[in-house]
Amino acid sequence: MAAPAWPWPPPVGAYAEERELFRLLQNMLEELLIHKPDDPIQYMINHLKQNNDDAPRICVLGPPASGKTTVKIPNALWANLIQERLSNVDCIKQGWILEGFPENQEQAWMLQSSGIIPRHVVVLYAPDTVLIERNSGKRLDPFTEEVYHTTFDWPSDPLIQQRLVKPEDLSEQEMSKKLLEYHRNLPGVFQIYQKVLKSINADQPSMDVLSQVLTYVQTRHRSAAPFTPRILFCGPPGSGKSLQAALIAQKYSVVNICCGQLLKEAVADKTKLGELIKPYIDNGYPVPDNLVMKILAKRLNALDCMTNGWVLYGFPRDIEQGEQLQKSHIIPNRVFFFNLSYESIMERLSQRRIDPVTGERYHMTFRPAPAPEIQVRLRQNPRDKEENIEKRVETYYRNVKELEDFYEDAIYVNADQDPHVVFEFIESCIIKPLPCKKLKSL
């Protein structure tokens, strides 16, 4: 039997993931297959020199009066004009937003055959009655060709008000005809772009529409790139980190690592490092960071962690420990901060009890002992006394701000919810790629 292939060393994998090398190669291959250059090598060199694979490529579609404009031009001419414009350097490097096109499936196919493939397609929708009403309020300034609206965008200048006219081609009958044509053509467009398309209700304040559009275009679609989860949970005591780590590990077969438990196991196994940290644990003192890092780095670099991924909690607790993790090339690709109010922390922790006979855990409110004889023998862990909880919480909040700044891409979790609701949110954030920072300025 052949020996199993060992994964790349952690720094190599982290570098490839951080620089998105797989996505870079995938994009270059797509460009080659679309454009079929005679000299593929030179084409790739030019592509790397001028192209920006993170530049937004967005289509905004919708019926008349939904918040975009349309102009009637023959399909072939449209495709040539658009291809010529989008081939300019500014579009290649900065990205583009194509408004009101394609209007039908034929136009969409023309764009694709020309190598114009949007990453995000936004379709605005609203009831026809609302669109017809909006349309009837449009007014045009014949001098500037600016479009105004009697309800939503009326000019403050009386001179402009006096010269506004109603566009001739926007009668209610003409509008109804355009809407009918739009509804007939939309399914064909939807079929082509369904994997990158999102419908957004345009019958709401424009700022709300804009917010939803921006949120969508800042998302990245799921990639076929290899992904090894390296998940870090940070949060105050009692926020549910251990439970969520167990749920994630159970479903996705990643390695569940609690730093405190890892130290105890090292002591129990009587390893060399375990013998060094034993006096600290026995006397209730913090274990020096350098010893914790040696034990943690060894575990996280083990084959199961490197192959399956891991979920870690209990470390780092401050920015110095976070920096030590980074220096050791242990870089999480998903960081979650659990938020929970002080009152909820106290309620969860101060009422925890344990049965010294069976080792079963109970909670005075949420999971009381099933029988009186069990109730009387329950004991409280000294760590769960209110004064000790208060110290632990105070320590956490003293250090968390710097840690949040250190992990600037972290995701924040409302931990004061049903555990399964929290799990579903965390799971969705692990599965989906992180938002593209370069789009935040849109």
Image (spheres, rainbow, N blue to C red):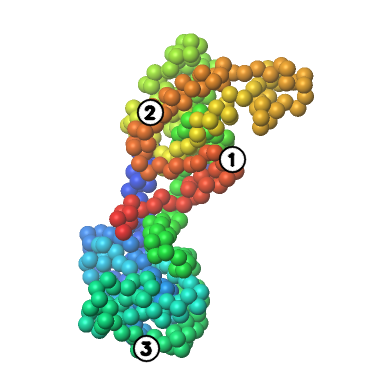
Q: Amino acid at mark 2?
A: Asn
Give the left or right position of residue 441, taking residue 124 as reference. Answer: left
The reply to whether residue 247 is in sight is: yes
Say which of 81 and 123 sits in front.
123
Which of the image's four quarters has the N terminus? top right
Which label number is shown at residue 169?
Answer: 3
Say which of 206 and 378 sits in front.
206
Compared to residue 47, the image places residue 8 above or below, namely: above
**Identity of the residue drawn at 35% across and 51% down:** 20
Disc 1 target residue: 419
**Identity of the residue drawn at 53% across and 30% down:** 343
Task: Residue 77 in the image: state x and y as whole percent.
Answer: 31, 84
**Identity of the residue drawn at 62% across and 25% down:** 352
Compared to residue 410, the image places residue 365 above or below, namely: above
Q: Amino acid at mark 1?
A: Pro
- Dot 3: within a 10 Å radius of its alpha carbon, few (fewer than 14), some, or many (20 or more) residues? few
Task: Residue 307 in the image: state x and y as whole percent.
Answer: 48, 40
Say which of 97 and 339 sits in front.
339
Task: Residue 120 in the image: state x and y as whole percent.
Answer: 40, 64
Residue 110: quadrant of the picture = bottom left
Label 1 to label 2: alpha-carbon separation = 26 Å
Circle 1 SS class: helix
Give the left or right position of residue 244, taking residue 214 as reference. Answer: right
- Dot 2: within a 10 Å radius of its alpha carbon, few (fewer than 14), some, or many (20 or more) residues? some
Eye-nearest disc, 1 or 3: 3
Question: Which is nearer the N-term, disc 1 or disc 2?
Answer: 2
Circle 3 SS class: loop
Label 2 to label 3: alpha-carbon separation = 64 Å
Label 1 to label 3: alpha-carbon separation = 57 Å
Question: Which is nearer the N-term, disc 1 or disc 3?
Answer: 3
Q: Amino acid at mark 3?
A: Asp
Disc 1 to disc 3: CB gap under 8 Å? no
